């Protein structure tokens, strides 16, 4: 047997939400490298134009769609356009997400709702739009980008942790409800990854020293480093491919060992 063929995505169509840069871009690049046709979306025309250039520079003919994943009408229109242009979506990566770092008692209900809307409600909306095509096709892969905060809390991220905890359970429920249609729904739980979303946590201090949170994360990570979006490429191809056809409802933590480690003694 040529086991590597099980990791091939040749002939597959993948939608990666929020893949203009960061983790989504790296995952889309990996799926393309494994043979998939790539569709991605974001809200900003500027991000879209920059992303299309970046994909093209890597030899990837990605198709970009301006779409806010919280808007069901926009999502349904985007999915219909993708299916007309690239074919039925075989692989969905619910990656688009935001975070607001605000102490809970200082956070407005609107700010809380915005985070939950993008990080939890949107994966429901996009999955609901894509699953009927997967059922007709007889297979499908859904990968929800969860988080360490699907398991752990910390100060200032109440909305994000609530959303990502919910996304873990939405992942398990989609797996439970649609497994009989040969649809596998799993999560990837990245650790602390160096992207624009975490840039504030790594900013150098005025005196040139490391951000305290930067040092904290290094002390909590057995790998003694921040993750890179590229660290998520292999896990994404695995969960998007036939190699994981009997993996369902699983959250694969790609965190350098943070969840397993009490942390380095100060
Ligand atoms: P990022 O650098 O902030 O990128 C977020 C992407 O999502 C951007 O392309 C953004 O583009 C898009 N987006 C945001 N809201 C959207 C919406 N309503 N509709 C459509 N697109 C939207 O984030 P990241 O660090 O790559 O994280 C990606 C995912 O991984 C998120 O779900 C995040 O929670 C999760 N995650 C990140 C880390 C980490 O350490 N970085 C760790 C664990 C999990 P526009 O603004 O143009 O829409
Ligand atoms: C934070 C970080 C984290 C990461 C990620 C960890 O403020 O704690 O942004 O939430 O983004 O989710 O897995």
Image (cartoon, rainbow, N blue to C red):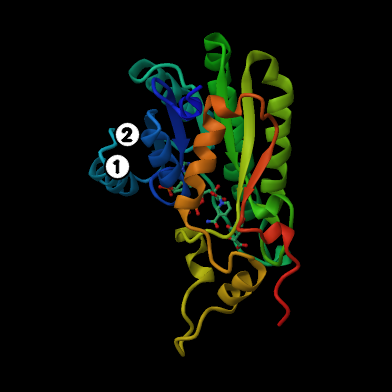
197 over 55 or under it: above or below? below
> In this rendering, does residue 114 appear at all?
yes
Which image quarter: residue 24? top left
For residue 55, the mark is 1
253 over 192 or under it: above or below? above
Of residue 101 and residue 184, the one placed in the foreground of this image is 184
On screen, residue 202 versus residue 163, left or right, reads: left
How many C-alpha atoms fall within 10 Å of the one at disc 1: few (<14), some, or many (≥20)?
many
On screen, residue 177 versus residue 120, left or right, reads: right
Q: Give the residue at x 68% y 34%.
A: 171
For residue 148, the mark is none
Q: Residue furthest front?
A: 1
Q: What percent of the width, then of the height, locates residue 201?
A: 54, 70
Find disc 2 in the rendering and name its residue.
62
**Distance from label 2 to label 1 (Cα)?**
6 Å
Q: Do the CB atoms of the residues marked 2 and 1 lie less than 8 Å apart?
A: yes
């Amino acid at each position: 047997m040529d086991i590597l063929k099980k990791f091939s995505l040749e002939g597959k169509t993948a939608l990666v939400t929020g893949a203009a840069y960061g983790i989504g871009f790296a995952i889309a690049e990996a799926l393309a490298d494994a043979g998939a046709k790539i569709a991605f979306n974001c809200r900003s025309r500027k991000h879209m134009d920059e992303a299309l250039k970046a994909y093209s520079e890597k030899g990837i003919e990605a198709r970009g769609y301006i779409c806010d994943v919280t808007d069901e009408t926009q999502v349904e229109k985007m999915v219909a356009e993708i299916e007309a242009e690239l074919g039925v979506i075989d692989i969905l990566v619910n990656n688009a997400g935001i975070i607001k770092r605000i102490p809970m008692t200082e956070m407005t209900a609107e700010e809380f709702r915005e985070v939950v809307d993008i990080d939890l409600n949107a994966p429901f909306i996009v999955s609901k739009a894509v699953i009927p095509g997967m059922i007709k096709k007889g297979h499908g892969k859904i990968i929800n980008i969860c988080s360490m905060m699907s398991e752990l809390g910390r100060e200032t991220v109440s909305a994000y942790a609530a959303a990502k905890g919910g996304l873990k359970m939405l992942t398990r429920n989609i797996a439970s409800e649609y497994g009989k249609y040969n649809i596998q729904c799993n999560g990837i739980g990245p650790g602390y990854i160096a992207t624009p979303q975490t840039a504030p946590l790594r900013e150098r201090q005025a005196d040139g020293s490391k951000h305290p949170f930067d040092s904290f994360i290094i002390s909590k990570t057995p790998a003694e480093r921040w993750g890179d979006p590229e660290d998520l490429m292999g896990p994404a191809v695995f969960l998007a491919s036939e190699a994981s056809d009997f993996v369902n409802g699983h959250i694969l933590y790609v965190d350098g060992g943070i969840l397993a480690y009490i942390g380095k003694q100060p």
